[in-house]
Amino acid sequence: MSQSRAQEDKYSDSGLDPNWRSDALDLGLDYGMQTIAVRAGQHRTDEGEHSEPIFTTSSYVYKSASDAAAHFDGTKTGNVYSRHTNPSVRTFERRLAALENGERAVATASGMGAILTMCLAYLKAGDHLLAANQLFGSSIGLFDNYMAKFGVEVSYVDCFDNEAWANAVQPNTKVIYCESPSNPLAQICDIGFLSQLSKANDILLVVDNCFGTPALQRPLDLGADVVIHSATKYLDGQGRVLGGALVGSDKLMQEAFTVVRSGGISMSPFNAWVFTKGLETLKLRMQAHCSNANQVAQFLVNHPNVSTVHFSGLTDHPSHELTKRQHHMKDGYGAIMGFEVKAKEGDDPKSGAWHVIDATRMVSITNNLGDAKTTITHPATTTHFRMTPEARAEAGVKDGLIRLSVGLEDVEDIIKDLARGLDSL
Ligand SMILES: Cc1ncc(COP(=O)(O)O)c(C=O)c1O
């Protein structure tokens, strides 16, 4: 045996599955959330590195031909190829699963990759997908244009109307899908009610927790079966890389994992490392995001040129009490809100919204959100542009609506930037 083979043997003869080594810092939920965010899921190698390394490798070596065969026939588990598993990706998956209180997480190349994985894993031709009408535009596009093409029936209901949800369930409904808070109006779904409805009808409840994050709410604890993330948003928190994830039971995640592996919807190791490090500060960032957002919402609601503020942190918002019950962070209502500007006599509402957006000097005009930088978006002409005008109207995405993702700058500066356009309407 060559020198290098002997060296490998020394490191791999422990008999342990390298996927789940005993030296991984695997913390249970008896630790506090911040400890889990900083330490859970780390796979420390024999080099003894303190911080999490990035495993930039597409494949893995075996001790012998029979060892390779054993990895393929399933008698031995371990890394085979990074489209299947990768240690950096696994660290992110384990840390996120611990934070969401799920048995397992499966990482994907983007948030949409996670939603596509959910569809391919849990739906087939003839099934019915029942979704909230308040969703990220691309999710609606995926459901209407592609799932429908493959024979999945899709319908939508008002996300806060429990009676409408109950009435829309069909014998072939297999998945109930919602975002809470939703994009772009930050509406809140009653996850406990939807869980009861799903369980009574043998349906999977899937909740996109991208706007809430586990720092604010854990949908699995509220009765959801699967949590979806666009990690691109708050899990990174600095707008650097794309990624997504599903979290849930071992059984459901195994079904998702085989879709990711076969379809190549896998997350890159570098992106996984960025998200792992992002999770370490998630709770602290979310506290600061929410505190800024609460102050910005107060400014907007008191401004004479704002007609409506969509933000459940406002005490007269219809979902204020529900949000307080569902979110475990005190005063944490999220940091994304919609607001509608009052159009001048004879002006169309879009020009008022564009005036406020164009008057900003510091806030970024972009379609991403969940970033340290405050972002401002006109959903009707960007993120929700591809929806039909009727679907947009039904979802409340009006021409005068602005979506704001409140960042981590000094809140006085965010307010000053918004006031510039609002004061001069
Ligand atoms: C609520 C929500 N879910 C999913 C996605 C899709 O995520 P990604 O852009 O990472 O594919 C987005 C993107 O904005 C979103 O806002």
Image (tube, rainbow, N blue to C red):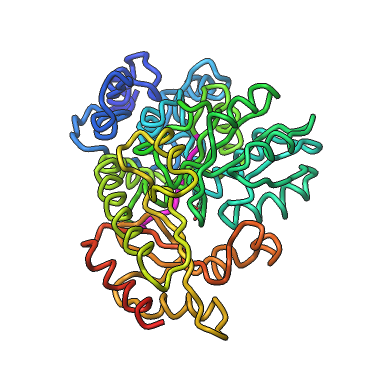
Task: Locate the C terminus and report the quarter of the image it occupies.
Answer: bottom left
Residue 236 against residue 359 in the figure, above or below = above
Residue 44 appears in the rendering: no
Q: Is residue 118 magenta?
A: no
Residue 274 appears in the rendering: yes
**Residue 416 rendering spot, x and y as whole percentages:** 26, 72
Quarter of the image for residue 325 reads top left
**Residue 356 rendering spot, x and y as whole percentages:** 41, 76
Residue 242 against residue 65 in the figure, above or below = below
Q: Residue at x 39, y 34 (%)?
A: 96
Task: Locate the N terminus and report the quarter of the image it occupies.
Answer: top left
Specify whether 277 is left or right of 141: left
Along the viewing direction, whichever of 52 and 251 lies nearer the viewer:
251
Q: Residue at x 61, y 38 (%)?
A: 118
Along the viewing direction, whichever of 208 and 349 lies nearer the viewer:
349
Q: Residue at x 33, y 43 (%)?
A: 332
Q: Main secondary structure of the magenta part?
A: loop
**Residue 140 rendering spot, x and y as whole percentages:** 64, 53
Specify whether 139 is left or right of 23: right
- Looking at the rendering, the stretch of residues picked out in magenta corresponds to 239-246
Q: Which residue is drawn at 58% across and 51% down?
A: 135
Residue positioned most to the bottom: 346
Residue 239 against residue 261 in the figure, above or below = below
